[in-house]
Every structure is written in structure tokens, then in C-alpha cells.
Image (cartoon, helix red, strand yellow):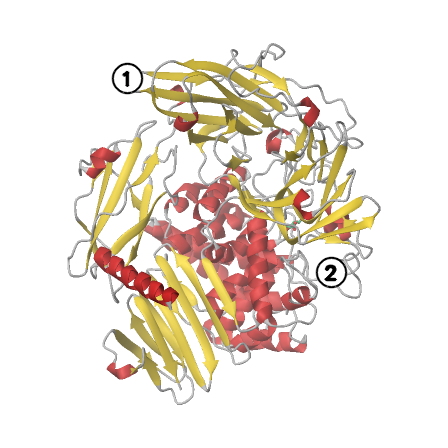
Amino acid sequence: MKAQWLLIVILISGIYTVNARNNGKIVPGYLRCEYKVDPLGIDVTSPRLSWELHSDQKNQYQSAYQVMVASSVEKLNNDEADLWDTGKVQSALTNQLPYSGRELLSRQECYWKVRVWNADDEVSAWSEAAYWSMGLIRYADWKGTWITHRAGVNNKDKYKELYLPPARYFRKSFSLDKKVKQAKAYFTSAGVFELRLNGEKVGKDHFTPGWTDYDKRIYYVTYDVTGQLVDGENVVGAIAADGWYAGYLGFALFIRSERVREFYGVDPAVFGQIEVEYEDGTKEIIATDQTWQSNQGPVREADILMGESYDARMEMPGWDRPGYDAKDWSKPRPSFPPDGKLEAYPTEPVRHIEEIRPVKITEPKAGVYIFDLGKNFAGVVRLKVEGESGQKITLRYGEMLHDDGTLMTENLRKARATDYYTLKGDGVEEWTPKFTYHGFQYVEVSGLSAKPDKGMITGIVMNSPTPQASTFRAANNMSNTLYKNILTTQFANFFEVPTDCPQRDERLGWTGDAQIYVRSAAYNADVASFFTKWLADLDDAQRTYGAYPNYAPFPYSRADQFSPGWMDAGIIVPHTLYKMYGDTRVIERMYAGMKKFMTFQLEASKDYIRPPGGMNYGDWLAVGQQVSDGFIAAAYFGYDARLMSEMAKAIGNEEDADYYAQLFEHIKKAFIKKYITEDGIIRDDDTETAYALALCFDLYPGHLAAKGAARLASMIRANGNVFSTGFLGTKHLMLALSANGYSDLAYDLFMQTKYPSWGYSIENGSTSIWERWNSYTREQGFGGGAGNNAKMNSFSHYAYGAVAEWMFRYGLGIDTEGVGFRDIIIRPQINSRMKAMQGSYRSINGKISSGWEIKDNKLHMEIGIPVNTKAKVYIPAFGKNNIRVNGRSLHKADDLTILSRDSDHTVLEVGSGTYVFTCE
Ligand code: BGC
């Protein structure tokens, strides 16, 4: 009873506070700058601002806004907007608003707030203050020099023995004798580094400054270190390791490439400065230079692919704290800086995201223990052990177990993926590697002196933080597992770049995988800044002759490293960011390169048919018929032209928009002539993928599309409603079916559990998305099905997870008319086998939800539309088509408009709010 009363009081006070705040008005919140909350040290001189709107009332719009930006929080609170005051601007804009106040210089601190007016011209309260600061924009701001520490020479036979040098340690003691007002650290490295200050790690980031083509750009990160400084002596330290800069990279060793490591440089180096501002207004800079000291330490090996080894006996207690005697340390060596331009890190660096406990320990061989962490993820483990000094613990990682319970590592190829810890023998010791990561579910631990318990290992999930943007639930449980597996695999691979897989000797930003998946990724999570960063990598990696390469960054410079369906990422990914977030800056930034790419394709074409070329990966990993390389090349060229025309228009380049629209028409005409018969059959390429691509890319003549779709559907049925398509065909097949009236068939595929299908892998225990339909089959296990190729068999490969796009656009029916979800489409494809689906997507304009259920001969739909947007809602014809809205007959509803009714749908237009529809 008591608890109930408490609940009622909480509820009433909740309602009261919402109303007191809200007053029936709209309230701005979730203020972001360049897609980030309160970012530090950015270098975009006209950063874009955004906010979300909330209201407890229906049909709410923003009629005007006012943004104030001030150089201090005090000024902002006093409405002294000394940097920018927009005044009241009549506009519905809530995102992509470019700052256009006073010029932003290095180190500028910017505090900002926004208020908005609703349709009745009532003003909201000011939002809470948000923040951003500028980094070091001018080269002259940097005062230090690059320093390194030599740690041996590589004279190993590169194919026979690994060369794994130790991490380098750097330190500098400095004294502060006045009261500090604030301090920031701006640092980078050639390699990967961890910054330390007075015995503690600075910030929460890992693998900074990330992976770029260091000869073109190298990022620095900014930290507020005010709270970490002390009076008197302070010590700043840095530990740097090879990382992507100098370590093993991709499959270079596997293919015995001439170079297997050190693709950008040899010795990891650090560079940066701490800037201290005293209360008396004076400033001091402590920058890396020859007055620092350098050394090796307990991190004996540190390589992303191979693993890390740590000898606790070599620890140097207190090395990064005041009072340490550093007499054995050396003077660092000066290092040539990488050629790239220093830029602020544009997205969120890799972090520790979640800790997971083992679910099971087994002992398949005496003294060899396997910890099962319950899911396949990317990251590391924290080891907690006790033992003798010099005792060496070995940690190996794998995604699967063999039948005898031992760890399967064949599919890691040349990635050693092994960590070593040597004990100092000093009670309980804890260790977490810093400079490596693995893709795994199982950890094999050996070298222990006693039977372990589950507390010995903690799994640490790591990735580049991309806030989850979606929810999904279906009446069919297998689909819920599929959704979970898709998220797990996306997060395991959004690790600095969108990698193909996190475990084997690859982990490259494969362009084909990225382009096929980017729209799914964007439904699942807020990937705007993550992909903005990767597009810089892709732009940097563009070949001089115009093609976008197979992966980016692109460290191996070889000829013809491009492929139709892969290189098109250079057009498709920017277009998707534009479509999902209304981002036009990414188009401007990529534009010159995209034009060059289009010219490259056009020049290779004959009569507008782009021939195959480069590597021609085809419909990669298809298990049935294979569409021809020529078809893929020709189809994607058409698609690119269409997207280019839209993007040119988006940035106001009408001339180019017309040019690419015409180019698309030419390509389409030539394509139809070459490939499509008068019966709508695809000539010489009568394959599922060919139909799927032609239909999705608008390459079918309008009057024949229905015939093409019918042919596609009949082929799928003839194949027993299972897949035969690969990376390129699979998602397009699902989209093409639903776009052409075959959603029921799409659902049959979606819910299929026979091989090959998503359901098959789930019924066989998958906790992630597998690289191949036949990564594992009941008959042939791990190797046989995959063409006797256990080595090329990843269990964490997001490409086939691209069905998420279908789940959101068609299953739930959440889509955008135009770009950026201002004009929303809610058009779920209901299905009597599936029975119910419910989910949401947090768009840049706020959260959109959609759910439907077929129950008691009624169709129920419940939708949520964010403030400042409107939606076209398609209610499928059902029963006698008697529709009620929020309990009232449709015709009595005065808060929506009926746009049209036909035998398929009733189409309504609604404003913000939640709506419950029933149809019987
Ligand atoms: C990667 C793929 C990639 C492919 C190119 C593989 O090794 O793992 O995901 O797209 O190569 O065909």
C-alpha cells in the first residue's frame, strides 16, 4: 500500500514538473555540436549545432529559435552573447545550423544555449548550457617537437618470426607554483598512446589518435586536465606503441607482401603540450621536447593483431608520479613527424564500453582453461591472478570451440591474438592490455598454478562509441535474436574504422561492406560523426586515377585495388549521411573526389555501360548463382549517377545536378538495352541479385518493373525460400521484394530457419552475424561448408546484417521523405505470420516509433512522431477497413488529415505526438 502511494506521488510530481517546465510549450534539449555532446578541442571553424524538441502536447512545431554563444558560462547566464547571438530567427531548423558568429580562434571556449518559439509564438525557457572548445588551429600554436625512443632494430626474417618491439615510455617532471585556473592537454602520437598525469590515465580514450593515412592527416586529442594537476611537482607521462602506424596491418603477412608491418613509420613517437592558465592570467606550456626522458617498461610487446605481453617484474613504480628518480632514463630521440596535417579528432575515440562476466569455465586439456564470455565481441580482458614471480600466463582468444572443447583459432590466420602476463609475485595482480584488442567469445588461459574461478577474467567490450538509436521487437523470437546479433556485430566492428571483422589478420575498412551496411548502421546507432571520420579516410585513400579503393585507410599501395560494388562507397556513404542526417557538408567535402570518381567510371565506359574492372569481387560469398561482374559494374554506375545528381542539388549545384540526372538517363537507357528484355527478364544475367539491383537502383523501365519483381519472386520460391545471394544481393533482394508488393515473401525469407538463412545460424547458436551463410553447417562444421576454407571464416562480420535496413524501412516502416526525417513516412508492412513488430529510431529530429499487431481480427498500430516533424502514415487495408484513432472514429479525429484512401491503404498526415490506430 505504502509503495503504491509513493508511486502515485512520484507520478503526480513527475507530471507536475513536466508541466511546470513545459507549460504546453516545446522544450529544447540534447544540444550537440558537430554531432557531439560538449566536445573539447574541435577545429571546425563553423561548427554545426543541433537540438531536439520535446512537448507533452500534440502537433507541436518550432516557429522560431534563438541561439546565444558566449565565451564564459557567466556571460551566457547574463545573456551576454559575446560570440554569437542569432536573435529570434523565424525558422523550423533544429539541426545542421552552422555557427556564424565571431571568428573562432584556437582555444576559444564556447558556451551556448537555445530557446524556441512554438506555433503560437510562445517562447520556451532557455535550454541548459552546452559547450564546445576549439583546439589548436594554427600550426604556430604547437610548441613542441616529436620525440621517440629507440628500442632495438628489426633484423628478423619477416615471414618466419614476428617482430614485436616494446612500448615506449616518456615522462617529464615540471613544477607549478601559482594557482591554476585551468589546463588542457593537446596530444597525439605516431602509433597509439596513453597519456598519464600524476599517476593516472588522462581521459577514457584508447587507441588514440586512431588510424588515418598519417602522411595526409594525423589527429590530436584534447583533454581538460585542470583537476589532475597539483601544486609543486607534476609529472606528465606517455606510453606509445606501434598501433596501425608501425605494427602489423591487415593480411600483409598472410599474403607475404613485401612489407608486413611499419607501413607508415618505424618508431612510435609522441607530440603534444599541456597548456596551463594561472589564476593571475599568465600561461605556461609544457611541450614534448628533448628535456623529456624516455625508456622501455613492462609492456614488452604491443601489437593490435598479435597481442600484448606484459612483464610485471619490469614495472617502474611511480614513474609517472612526482618524486620518482629517473636517473636510468634516457634522453628521447628527435623524430621526424608524419607528413600529415594536424587536425582535431573528429569523432569519439575507442573506449571501454561494458564489462562482462564469464558464463562458464571449462578445462578441455589439463591445466588449460576456457572462459566463455557469452557473446562474440571486440575488446580485451582484465586478468586477476596470484602466483610466483616470473610465472607466465598465456591468454589466447577465439570465437568458437572445436567439438572437443578446445579453442578454434584457424580462422584468425596470421593474427597471433595472444597476450602474455608475467607475474611479479606480489599478491593479487591485475592487468588489462592497452594496445591490442581481439574479436572473441572465448579466452583460453594457461600457465596458472591453481584452478581458476570466474572472477579471474572480466571481458571488456570496446568500440568507437556510437550511441544506439534503435529498438526492435518482433513477435517472432528468432528475429529478436537476429536484431541483437546485428547490434553486437556492428559494435564489434565500429572500431576506429568500420572493419570487416575484428578477429583475423584483416580488420580493414572494407568499402563494400561499409556501403552495403551504412543505412542499417545509421538506423541502429548514431553513426554521423563515426562515418564523417571514415569518409576522410576514404577521401584520402582515393586513387590518383579516381577509383575509391577496396578499403580505407589504404596502406598497401598496389595497382587496380578497386572493385565495382566496393568503390561505390565513395558515393553511397556520403549520400546516406545526407539522407539520414540532412548533412550537406559531407557532400561538399567529398565533392571534388566524387566527381573525379564519376569521370573515372565514365571514361572506362563504352556507350554508358561501365565494364567490370579492378578486383571484381562480384556478389561476394553468394552461395548460389553468381551475377556477372559486368552487370554489377553497370548497375552501380547508374546508381552512382542518380545519387550524384541528388547530392549536387543538395549543395545548390544545379548544373551538375542536371548533368548527373542526364547521365543517369543515358546509363539507364543503355542498361535497359543491354540487359532487359521486353518481357522484363534480365538477359544473360537471370539471377536474383541482378533483379534486386536493377529494381532498387531504378534501372527497370517503369512498365516492366512488375514483371522483373515477379520473376525475382518466382526464382526465390523455386529455390525454396532460402538465400543464394551474397553481400551485394541479399539486402537489395529484401528491399526489392517489399518495394514491389512481395513483403510476404520477404517475411518468409526473414523468418526462414532452413539453410541458408539468418534463422539457420541462430538455430545453430550464433550470437553474432557470420561472414558466410555457410560459416557453419550441421553437416560440415566450420570448414567444409565454407569451401574448405576455415581460414576465411569470421563469426563477426556485419555485412549480412544489412537486413536491418529492411527491418526498419519496411518491417516497422520508418522512413524519410526527402532527407533527415522532417517529413516522416510510417508505412509498416504487416504480415500475418509475423503477427507483431514494434520499434523505434532516434532520428536527428527526435525519436520516431512504430508498432503493429494483428490480434483478435484487428490490426493495431501505435506510432510516435517527434515535435517539429510530420508524418505520412499508411494504414494498410484490413478487415472492413474501419479505422479508429485514439479510440475515436477516423472521421471524428480533428488532429490529423486524411490524404487518400484506396484499396491498399488509408494515408493520413499527422503532426507530433503518439497515435493509436485500430482497423477491423
Ligand atoms: C573481407 C570482406 C571484403 C572482402 C572483399 C574479405 O577478406 O573480409 O568483408 O569485403 O574481402 O571481397
Residue 19 at what x, y percent from top left?
Answer: 23, 60
On the question of residue 134 being in view, the answer is yes
Relative to 312, say whether 323 is above or below. Answer: above
Quarter of the image with the C terminus is bottom left
Instruction: Kindly tell me whether mark 2's CB lies below 8 Å from ligand 1.
Output: no
Residue 2 at what x, y percent from top left?
Answer: 37, 65
What amino acid is at disc 1? Answer: Asp
The crowd level at tag 2 (other Cα within 10 Å; few <14, some 14-19, many 20+) is many
**Nearer to the camera, 323 or 175:** 323
Q: Secondary structure at mark 2?
A: loop
Instruction: Kindly tell me whether mark 1's CB lies below 8 Å from ligand 1.
Output: no
Real-space Cα distance between discs 2 and 1?
67 Å
Side of 843 where 127 appears, left or right? left
Examine the image and state in which quarter residue 576 appears: bottom left
- In the current view of this chain or complex, which residue is farthest to the right? 366
On the question of residue 611 being in view, the answer is no
**Nearer to the camera, 339 or 830:** 830
Residue 728 at what x, y percent from top left?
Answer: 59, 59
Provide the residue designation for mark 1.
280
Q: Secondary structure at mark 1?
A: loop
Q: Residue at (28%, 78%) from the top-left corner?
A: 898
Examine the image and state in which quarter residue 801 appears: bottom right
Provide the residue designation for mark 2.
776
